[in-house]
Image (spheres, rainbow, N blue to C red):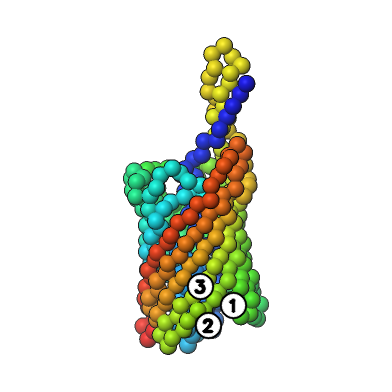
Amino acid sequence: MKSHRAIYNKRLLAVWLLLFTVATTADLYAQEPEEDEIDLLLDELFFNEQQFIDDILNSFNTFNFIYVNTSFYDNTFFSGRDSGIDQFSIVPQVSYYSSSGFNVSVSGILYETFEPNWDYTNMSVGYFNTVGKDKLVTYNAEYTRFFYSDGWDTFTNSLSLGVGLRTKERNLGTKLGVSYLFGTDGAFQITSRTYANITIARQKKSVVKFRPKINFLIAQQTIALEQLNTQVTEPQTEIIYDDIFDLLNTQINLPLSLSTKSWDFEAGYNINLPSPVKSETDLKTTGFFNLSVGYIIDLDKKTL
């Protein structure tokens, strides 16, 4: 008789966590920014999915800015799965954005209990644009390089392509992204995101928004199965490796944001609905709170 259970690579799942959180489909347009374009851009490109005031660059024909942001998560899950360790994580990020379509970003992640605490730093370079007169279709390409504190080299690079579609009113949209991670090994992933953009209150210099989202993560990974072989004289454990490409997690984001001309603040609750693969059973729904603060620096020195 043989019994086996899955052994998951937490570092690999951490990479999926990163790419599931980082949206790679941008909503910025090369000419004549309209209302809500800058907050949609920051929401879809950066780590913490921010909402910015919709008229922040309403009168600009071009823009050239730096966005600084820090996000806090009160608990950490990997592809929605409970690692058995309760720990918070902090994600700082600095990004540059140009109306030419060019963007570059540096970010990292710190875990409360991991050793070392600073897990990795990543640098991204990307390009974005739109299709059609109404600019309802967006697309982008991005390259990301990962630098791990412990020298892990299985996945040190990522190439991503994304496409998005939204309504003319900018209040509903959907995104689809495909990424290939590579280093000493390679793997594909697909992410999908559908969102709503709801304005709750608006003042002259501030706006409060609710923008719920539902995200799907489909990824390729190798699972190590620990198998107990009892058909021999002395039972022994064997390790069997199996490649899968399946839905790993569905995540629901419920963020509430307050944005001013230069600052934005967000508080939200997030629900993970992990999907079992292979021998996984009894996966529980998980949830966590997030807080974030961001600041935009206009390099063209226009008055915000």
Question: Spatial distance from mark 1 to mark 2, Cα to Cα?
Answer: 9 Å
| Horizontal side of residue 117 vs 52, given as left or right | left
Mark 2 element type: loop
Q: Residues within 10 Å of mark 1 (few under 14, many from 20)?
A: some
From what the image shows, is residue 29 above or below residue 78?
A: below
Spatial separation of the CA atoms under disc 2 and disc 3:
16 Å
3 or 1: tag closer to the N-terminus: 1
Element class at badge 1: loop
Q: Which residue is labeled 2 in the image?
A: 35
Asked whether residue 98 appears in the rendered view, the answer is no
Total numbered circles? 3
Q: Percent x, y for residue 3?
A: 59, 27
Locate residue 236, reporting x and y percent: 53, 19
Q: Which amino acid does label 3 sit on?
A: Phe
Image position of 169 with respect to 283: above or below: below
Q: Mark 3 points at which residue?
A: 210
> Which numbered tag is attached to residue 170?
1
Q: With 136 as the anchor, is 259 left or right in this view? A: left
Q: Which residue is drawn at 63% across and 45% down?
A: 245
Residue under the image location 55 percent in, 35 percent down: 6
Disc 3 element: strand
Give the numbered dot on residue 55: none
Pointer 2 local density, CA inside 10 Å: few below 14, some 14–19, many at least 20: some
